[in-house]
Image: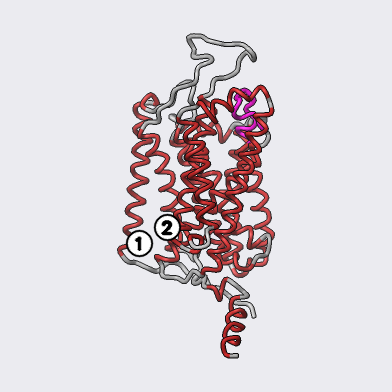
């Protein structure tokens, strides 16, 4: 017998909910204030310069954009691959995907310095530019996922959800491929010129998006006092571990490929051994904190069963993801351009010199404000629309749970 899980909006009007909205609203206000400060005084108040033109706000923005694609992965598993336990999770998955993308794009727009110049990007397209393609991909993603949510939540349109879900799945793969290709197509940078950047970003999206989704799901179900069974949490945390291991694999393949090519040896030495803060962020932030420690926690016999440990593993994955984005985006720009291969270059324009960059406080505040925009959008949406399932206990989420429980009871009776 199939079990139907009904959806309803959050009806809790307690001080806890509005306190959360107040905190997130304050974070958004601080982020907007930082954006105004940078726009009013000019970008000289930031750590960005002529060498580092993509600063800390871009680290947060690209992270959120990549995570948005991965957050939709939960819905895709249910709609595209027909996994019944994941179907009740689809509406929240789609909502979180849109919210994360909007938060990331908001950071980019507010960091332009001249936000009105966005009109040029929206009206004039150079189809030889991957940036122009990404504007289409981002807008298309929001529209497609919105239609997908409509199909999911309207009973009369339910039969179309799988078709639209498949289209959304393919679109998000293309979107993340386009985001990774921004870096893969920059052939002048030793850190970026690699075709593996596209699949690396796809796998990173799976990891980052699922980590954020799992945190939001566990927190939302707990705060609304709705049951969340161990069976579903175990499925999600095991899947998250696979994605984290996948990111490690692609990072290893990327660096082994670079070490094989002589032209990349100098950059690899810079990042892996002599890059100062970038080397530390790579080994301590990305590899240790963001990959090895969470993997150990997720698959540990006892820690892997603890909701608190799983939550902390998700937090570490998010922090490691931000460190990874920092080394890719800022570390890649800091390493000097190779203008004349095989020769030493020096000039008054800092040619051949590792660029200096110290992020300013407004940059961090703007980036955190993007997170606030995404989370407050989710919090307000689940208040008024039925994005969250009523229950996700083991009996509802695991079709074999009831049978296994009955067998166990019969065995005890015998």
Report the predominant secondary structure element of the magenta stretch.
loop
On the question of residue 142 being in view, the answer is no
- Left or right, 367 with respect to 343, comes to left
Considering depth in this image, is 280 or 362 the residue closer to the camera?
280
Task: Identify the image's colour scheme: rainbow, by chain, secondary structure or one colour.
Answer: secondary structure
Q: Which residue is mark 2?
A: 379
Q: Is residue 147 above or below residue 2?
A: above
Residue on which disc 1 sits: 17
Q: Quadrant of residue 149?
A: bottom right
Identify the residue at image location x=64%, y=30%. Answer: 129
Left or right: residue 69 versus residue 355 is right
Q: Secondary structure at mark 1?
A: helix
Q: Residue at x 35, y 36 (%)?
A: 34
Cβ atoms at labels 1 and 2 below 8 Å apart? yes
In the rendered image, the quadrant that contains the N terminus is bottom right
Would residue 92 appear left or right of 129 to someone viewing this image? left
Is residue 291 shown above or below 183? below
Q: Earlier in the sequence, mark 1 or mark 2?
A: 1
Query: Badge 1, how many Cα within 10 Å: few under 14, some, many 20+?
Result: some
Q: Give the farthest residue toward the top.
A: 347
Percent across and percent down for residue 363 are: 40, 34
Quadrant housing the C terminus: bottom right
Residue 188 drawn in magenta: yes
The segment highlighted magenta reads: 181-194
Give x and y (percent) for residue 327.
Answer: 51, 33
């Amino acid at each position: 017998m199939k079990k139907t899980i009904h959806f309803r909006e959050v009806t809790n009007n307690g001080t806890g909910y509005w306190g959360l909205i107040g905190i997130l609203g304050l974070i958004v206000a601080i982020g907007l204030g930082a954006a105004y400060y940078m726009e009013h005084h000019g970008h000289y108040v930031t750590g960005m310069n002529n060498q580092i033109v993509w600063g800390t706000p871009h680290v947060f923005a690209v992270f959120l954009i990549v995570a948005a694609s991965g957050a939709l992965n939960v819905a895709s598993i249910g709609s595209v691959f027909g996994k019944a336990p994941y179907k009740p999770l689809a509406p929240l998955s789609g909502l979180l995907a849109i919210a994360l993308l909007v938060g990331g794009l908001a950071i980019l727009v507010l960091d332009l310095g001249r936000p009105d110049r966005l009109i040029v990007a929206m009206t004039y397209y150079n189809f030889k530019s991957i940036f122009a393609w990404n504007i289409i991909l981002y807008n298309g993603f929001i529209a497609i996922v919105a239609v997908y949510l409509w199909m999911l939540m309207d009973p009369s349109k339910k039969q179309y959800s799988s078709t639209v879900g498949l289209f959304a799945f393919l679109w998000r793969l293309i979107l993340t491929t386009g985001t990774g290709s921004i870096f893969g197509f920059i052939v002048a940078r030793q850190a970026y010129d690699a075709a593996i950047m596209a699949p690396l970003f796809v796998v990173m999206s799976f990891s980052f998006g699922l980590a954020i989704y799992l945190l939001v799901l566990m927190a939302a179900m707990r705060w609304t006092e709705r049951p969340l069974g161990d069976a579903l949490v175990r499925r999600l945390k095991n899947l998250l571990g696979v994605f984290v291991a996948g990111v490690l694999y692609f990072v290893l393949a990327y660096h082994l490929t670079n070490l094989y090519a002589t032209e990349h040896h100098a950059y690899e030495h810079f990042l892996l051994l002599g890059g100062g803060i970038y080397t530390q962020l790579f080994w301590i932030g990305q590899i240790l904190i963001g990959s090895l420690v969470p993997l150990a926690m997720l698959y540990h016999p006892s820690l892997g069963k603890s909701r608190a440990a799983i939550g902390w593993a998700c937090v570490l994955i998010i922090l490691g993801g931000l460190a990874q984005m920092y080394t890719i985006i800022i570390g890649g720009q800091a390493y000097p351009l190779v203008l004349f291969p095989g020769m030493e270059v020096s000039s008054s324009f800092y040619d051949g010199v590792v660029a200096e960059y110290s992020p300013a406080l407004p940059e961090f505040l703007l980036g955190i404000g993007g997170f606030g925009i995404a989370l407050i959008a989710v919090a307000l949406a689940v208040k008024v629309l039925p994005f969250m399932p009523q229950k996700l206990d083991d009996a509802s989420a695991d079709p074999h749970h009831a049978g296994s429980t009955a067998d166990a009871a019969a065995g005890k009776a015998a």
